């Protein structure tokens, strides 16, 4: 899946913050105002702007901006280990109180290429109501995302090297609970809808590692297409794997842990989202404004329709009623709001530069 990123300051709490990796700030972090996000909202990661835009769902307007600092003014006097570099994807805790942000430390918006030698990643935990940065945890190697376990007690993140690993942190204190060996250059870590497994897309191994959440052991390694980036969960207990290099989509049945179908798309997928109410798969076409819609036809999946978002359309999220889709547009700094039934754009909401990850809170 195509990526994007952001350069920024590591700590944005009310009275400064402490980094869990033992590096103190040489200069105070800019104060993040106390917010009161007590309304249904979309949180959008703006990679290049180094911020989160908060869109009120009722009005589809940006109401707040959560800043991770301005790197152009904060470089002097700061240790590099205290800086956020290119935040990427975002997840919400099961109780809706926390946001997990993966920070790979490099711009992934033009494609997935893995980390570089010596580059670190970060895990940020943000208070979803106040906007305060509660955790700024450095990881040994570039990571891709930071997602919560189904019970909210853990945070899982990948380590994007040939010696691929997944790190499992205690969400309460960020102590490392487990290191799990996976395939080469693991990207996104996602959780199945049934809460039994974590799925890890190994982009260089062309596989997906399935990890049992109960005991954190590898249940199976599944071959998929070339260059898998994320296994995106569907409410139908299927996982939809976007294979960037192979320009395909692999569908994994969670019950059998087997690929049931591989769809040749003919384009590079950026993201895949399953719409349960309509039994559709929406796949953003990387580098364009197109989001093809696939439906079951003749015993398989075929493109049935398409919506037009904005330049370099990427992440796709449906609201809880399934009536509205939100799509980040990396190329023009907007989020497209789409009427699902009519396939029509309601509006484009201006956010920060290179918006990538997106999550909704109710």
Image (cartoon, helix red, strand yellow):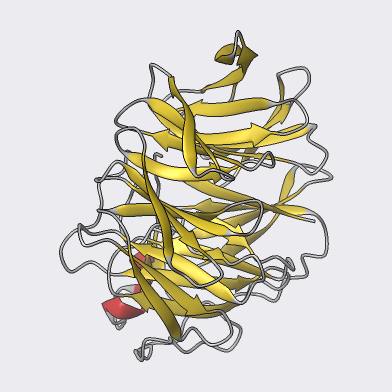
Is the residue 75 above or below the residue 244 in the image?
below
Name the residue at the top extreme. 298
Q: Residue at horizontal 49%, vertical 64%?
A: 146
Q: Quick check: 269 above or below 92?
A: above
Q: Nearer the viewer, residue 209 or 257?
A: 257
Above or below residue 177? Residue 39 is above
Coordinates of residue 263 in the picture (x, y in percent): 45, 21
Position in image of residue 11 (x %, y %): 48, 78
Q: Is residue 199 left or right of residue 362?
A: left
Asked if 346 appears above or below 360 in the picture, the reply is above
Pick the front one: 212 or 275: 212
Quadrant of the rendered structure where residue 39 is?
bottom right
Question: In the picture provided, is 110 more to the left or to the right than 132?
Answer: left
Task: Report the front residue among 112 and 106.
Answer: 112
The answer, for residue 131, to whether it is visible in the render is yes
Q: Residue 74 appears at what percent x and percent y?
A: 36, 74
Furthest residue toward front? 256
Q: Nearer the viewer, residue 23 or 152?
A: 152
Residue lying farthest to the left in this orientation: 117
Q: Residue at coordinates 43% horizontally, 87% vertically from top-left?
A: 20
In the displayed structure, does residue 343 sit left or right of residue 245?
right
Tell me residue 290's x, y (percent).
52, 20
Residue plotted at (68% across, 68% down): 128
Q: Quadrant of residue 280?
A: top right
- Please give the name of the residue rendered at 47% of the width and 78% of the height, measured from the top-left corner: 169
User: Which quadrant of the figure contains the N terminus?
Assistant: top left
């Amino acid at each position: 899946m195509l990526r994007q990123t952001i350069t920024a300051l590591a700590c944005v709490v009310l009275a400064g913050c402490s980094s869990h990796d033992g590096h103190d700030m040489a200069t105070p972090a800019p104060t993040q105002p106390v917010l009161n996000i007590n309304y249904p909202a979309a949180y959008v990661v703006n990679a290049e702007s180094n911020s989160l835009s908060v869109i009120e769902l009722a009005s589809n307007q940006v109401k707040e901006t959560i800043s991770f600092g301005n790197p152009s003014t904060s470089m002097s006097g700061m240790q590099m280990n205290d800086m956020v570099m290119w935040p990427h994807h975002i997840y919400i805790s099961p109780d809706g109180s926390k946001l997990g942000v993966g920070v790979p430390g490099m711009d992934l918006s033009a494609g997935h290429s893995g980390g570089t030698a010596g580059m670190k990643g970060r895990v940020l935990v943000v208070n979803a109501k106040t906007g305060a940065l509660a955790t700024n945890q450095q990881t040994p190697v570039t990571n891709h995302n930071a997602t919560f376990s189904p019970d909210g007690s853990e945070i899982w993140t990948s380590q994007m090297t040939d010696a691929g690993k997944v790190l499992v942190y205690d969400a309460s204190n960020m102590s490392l609970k487990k290191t799990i060996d996976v395939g080469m250059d693991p990207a996104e870590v996602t959780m199945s809808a049934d809460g039994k497994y974590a799925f890890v897309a190994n982009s260089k191994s062309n596989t997906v590692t399935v990890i049992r959440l109960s005991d954190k052991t590898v249940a199976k390694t599944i071959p998929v297409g070339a260059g898998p980036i994320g296994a995106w969960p569907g409410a139908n207990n299927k996982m939809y794997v976007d294979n960037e290099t192979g320009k395909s989509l692999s569908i994994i049945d969670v019950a059998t842990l087997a690929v049931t179908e591989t769809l040749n798309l003919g384009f590079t997928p950026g993201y895949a989202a399953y719409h349960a109410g309509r039994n559709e798969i929406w796949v953003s076409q990387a580098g364009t404004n197109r989001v093809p819609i696939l439906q079951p036809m003749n015993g398989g999946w075929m493109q049935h329709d398409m919506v037009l978002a904005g330049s370099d359309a990427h992440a796709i999220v449906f609201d809880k009623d399934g009536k509205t889709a939100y799509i980040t547009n990396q190329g023009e700094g907007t989020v497209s709001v789409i009427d699902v039934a009519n396939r029509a754009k309601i509006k484009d909401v201006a956010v920060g530069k290179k918006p990538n990850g997106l999550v909704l809170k109710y």
